């Protein structure tokens, strides 16, 4: 019964995001970038229908199409933790007619452990804007024996925790790999689920103990009584939502990373720093990009139009109705954030690489 209600809720939620594949401009007269007037722009989403990146894309695209005086055609191109779509953007002609949304944290992490074929979000794209960060929670099924993080610590005395994740290299996978390492939690990671919805179903079926996902993406399932948050992967409260009351933080001076380190007679300061770095890494997410080499004038025009779109009251109101938070930044701020995150990746890379090698496939 719980599984049927979950599927119903997912289906009803998706109805609100079911835009047509080709989103026409609603503008009259010239758009913000004259060379794009009346053209069709391909927006690549490197993830399957219904996920967070797809939903953000379908939220923003109609408003951006109107600002540009163009049409935007969404193209979902899932595979390899977002790499298939990211490579497609990277290899497209830099003419303003291809853009897309990528996960910076996932690309940065995968690049350090997966060879030299991974696009660098800072160097291998033309950055346009950040549409949103990501704030993750660990959560268990509502009927699970895991009702709190203390329950989790109790169970690891007997067996590893089984985590479920999409592709190895996804931000969910990375948050599991690094979070469990910081907390010294024995784990098994089952990776390769088609999308977040499938991971949630795995938790409901009892195939996995814990999932890690963006809080906003999990909120419908939490409010429907399917999921229970166990841990906020942050230094400060993610939200004032009542479901997070009493749910501990990973980082910060009062976070459980430091407490866990003390209990295990490890360095609490180092654990706190690692937890803060993980929260920052997760936050470098959801950036809208174009292929590298885009003409400077066109790049500036498209960025300006996109930032104006993302900060417009109409889009903010639409996002609020969907209970999505927009965390907008232009290309310079995005680059600065990526530089900070990159400075920590040399420490995190061996941990993620080991987790990828140890993960078992769904």
Image (spheres, helix red, strand yellow):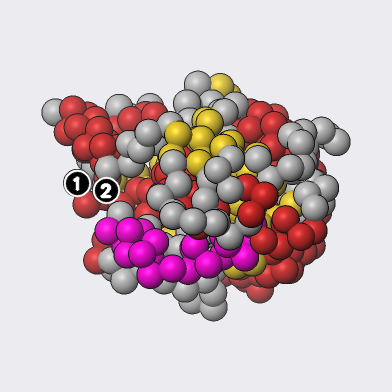
Residue 273 is left or right of residue 326, and the answer is: right
Quick check: 277 above or below 159?
below
Residue 288 is left or right of residue 74, and the answer is: right
Q: Residue furthest top?
A: 362
Magenta stretch prevailing secondary structure: helix
The answer to which of 257 and 216 lies nearer the viewer is 216
In the rendered image, residue 315, in percent from the top left (x then y), is placed at 39, 61
Q: Residue furthest left?
A: 1
In the rendered image, residue 78, in percent from the top left (x then y), is placed at 56, 28
| Magenta-colored span | 302-321
Identified at 41% across, 71% down, the residue is: 237
Residue 173 is left or right of residue 355, and the answer is: left
Identified at 44% across, 68% down, the residue is: 312
Q: Residue furthest bottom?
A: 253
Quick check: 255 above or below 166?
below
Residue 220's tag is 2
In what element is the residue under mark 1? Answer: loop
The answer to which of 125 and 294 lies nearer the viewer is 294
The verdict on residue 318 being magenta is yes
Residue 140 falls in image quadrant: top left
Asked if labels 2 and 1 touch by Cβ distance under 8 angstroms, the answer is yes
In the rendered image, residue 174, in percent from the top left (x then y), is placed at 60, 45
In what element is the residue under mark 2? Answer: helix
The verdict on residue 182 being magenta is no
Instruction: Find disc 1 in the rendering and name its residue.
Output: 224
Identified at 44% across, 54% down, the residue is: 27
The answer to which of 107 and 15 lies nearer the viewer is 15
Number of numbered discs on residues:
2
Residue 342 falls in image quadrant: bottom right
Identified at 74% across, 42% down, the residue is: 95
Query: Is disc 1 surrounded by few (<14), some (14 to 19) or many (20+) residues within 10 Å?
Result: few
């Amino acid at each position: 019964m719980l599984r049927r209600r979950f599927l119903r809720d997912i289906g009803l939620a998706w109805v609100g995001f079911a835009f047509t594949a080709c989103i026409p401009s609603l503008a009259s007269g010239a758009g913000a970038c004259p060379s794009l007037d009346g053209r069709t722009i391909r927006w690549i989403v490197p993830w399957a229908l219904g996920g967070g990146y797809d939903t953000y894309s379908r939220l923003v695209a109609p408003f951006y199409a109107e600002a540009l005086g163009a049409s935007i055609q969404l193209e979902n191109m899932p595979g390899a933790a977002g790499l298939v779509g990211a490579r497609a953007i990277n290899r497209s002609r830099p003419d303003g007619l291809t853009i897309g949304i990528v996960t910076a944290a996932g690309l940065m992490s995968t690049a350090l452990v997966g060879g030299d074929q991974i696009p660098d979000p800072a160097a291998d794209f033309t950055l346009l804007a950040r549409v949103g960060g990501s704030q993750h929670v660990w959560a268990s099924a509502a009927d699970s024996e895991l009702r709190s993080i203390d329950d989790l610590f109790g169970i690891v005395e007997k067996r590893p925790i089984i985590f479920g994740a999409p592709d190895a290299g996804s931000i969910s996978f990375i948050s599991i790999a690094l979070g469990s390492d910081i907390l010294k939690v024995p784990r098994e990671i089952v990776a390769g689920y088609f999308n977040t919805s499938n991971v949630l179903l795995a938790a409901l079926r009892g195939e996995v103990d814990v999932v890690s996902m963006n809080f906003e993406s999990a909120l419908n399932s939490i409010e429907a009584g399917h999921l229970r948050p166990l841990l906020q992967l942050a230094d400060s409260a993610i939200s004032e939502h009542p479901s997070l009351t009493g749910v501990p933080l990973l980082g910060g001076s009062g976070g459980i990373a430091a407490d866990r380190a003390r209990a295990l007679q490890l360095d609490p300061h180092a654990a706190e720093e690692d937890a803060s770095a993980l929260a920052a890494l997760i936050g470098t997410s959801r950036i809208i990009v174009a292929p590298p080499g885009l003409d400077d004038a066109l790049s500036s025009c498209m960025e300006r139009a996109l930032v104006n779109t993302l900060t417009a009251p109409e889009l903010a109101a639409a996002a609020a109705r969907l209970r999505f938070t927009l965390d907008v930044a232009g290309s310079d701020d995005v680059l600065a954030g990526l530089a900070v995150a990159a400075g920590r990746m040399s420490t995190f890379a061996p941990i993620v690489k080991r987790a990828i090698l140890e993960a078992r496939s769904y």
